[in-house]
Amino acid sequence: MLLSADHPEWTLAEIGAYVGLCDDTVGTWRKRFIAQRLEGLSDAPKSGALRTIQDAATLRVVHLTLDTLPEGETHWSTRNMAQVSGMTQRAVHRIWRAFGLRPHLVSSFTLSNDPLLIEQVRDIVGLYLAPPDRALVLCIDEKPQIQALERGSATVPMLPGQPEATGPTYVRHGTTPLIAALNANVEIVIGQCYPQHWAEEFRAFLDLMHAQVPVGLEVHVILDNDITHKTKTIQNRLLAHPNVHFHFTPTSGSWLNLVES
């Protein structure tokens, strides 16, 4: 109605395209408004069977789901909720779907108690959004214990409508750590696998990374608080390369490191 008043030259199809409705629906609401004014914008009585579940019963199911647990169980199911509420499982399912409740799912969260959280977030986000002139921003992270697998069966090539498929057998050749650095400026990744994950391997990766950095650039490295990043070996290397600066993510805040995504 507001669009019709503000743009009297618009057709029903133009208004429908703007609000995501078909022109027949727009025409129906305009006719109801013309005939009944504001009362015409309220929903008309629905056809079909009357409601059998009242608001109080619906709210009780929501309350039980959010604030209680079934006796002897870890979470509610449609079956035990139906037994407690006196509803059918289908009715419980409809209520849960309407309120976005999924008792069978559990997610996790992490809160950082780092006293320097705000300062470190500002520091790292500032490097992403406004890096210094003639500076390179690198995000480094390690992935330990990657399984080195050799497929023991043939691979079926991709066909139209069918992805490439591999057999279930494989030969395991132990695990290997991966160290990777993301160039946040141009989104290029430098990666290298090592037989183990210690300070010497991390120093070797820094040497590999440094060899690919143009001369004359400051290098800002974003990384987590792993013990290998703070050893004497790494500290000595930083002293020998004063153009390299470490920026540590907060405790339980490694999500700030873009290479993880």
Image (tube, helix red, strand yellow):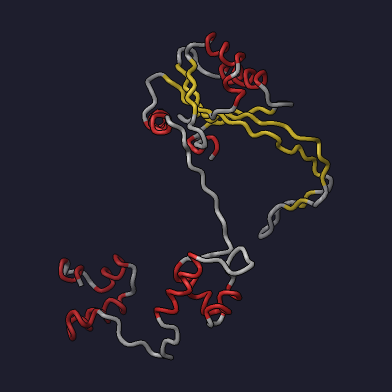
Report the front residue among 187 and 201: 201
Quarter residue 227 falls in: top right
**Above or below 143: residue 234:** above
**Above or below 19: residue 47:** below
Report the front residue among 1 and 234: 234
Q: Where is residue 38 shown, x and y percent of the image?
A: 18, 79
Q: Residue at x 64, y 67 (%)?
A: 72
Residue found at the very far front of the displayed protein: 71
Q: How many numbered marks have been drawn onto this rendered protein structure?
A: 0
Q: Specify the quadrant that holds the N terminus.
A: bottom left
Q: Residue at x 53, y 82 (%)?
A: 86
**47 lies left or right of 93:** left
Q: Where is residue 247 shown, x and y percent of the image?
A: 47, 24
**125 lies left or right of 174:** left
Report the front residue among 237 and 216: 237
Quarter residue 4 falls in: bottom left
Q: Residue at x 80, y 52 (%)?
A: 168
Q: Where is residue 27 shown, x and y percent of the image?
A: 26, 79
**246 lies left or right of 150:** left
Q: Residue at x 53, y 40 (%)?
A: 261
Residue found at the very far top of the displayed protein: 240
Report the front residue among 101 and 180: 101
**Above or below 26: residue 235:** above
Q: Where is residue 49 shown, x and y percent of the image?
A: 43, 91
Quarter residue 80 falls in: bottom right
**60 lies left or right of 196:** left
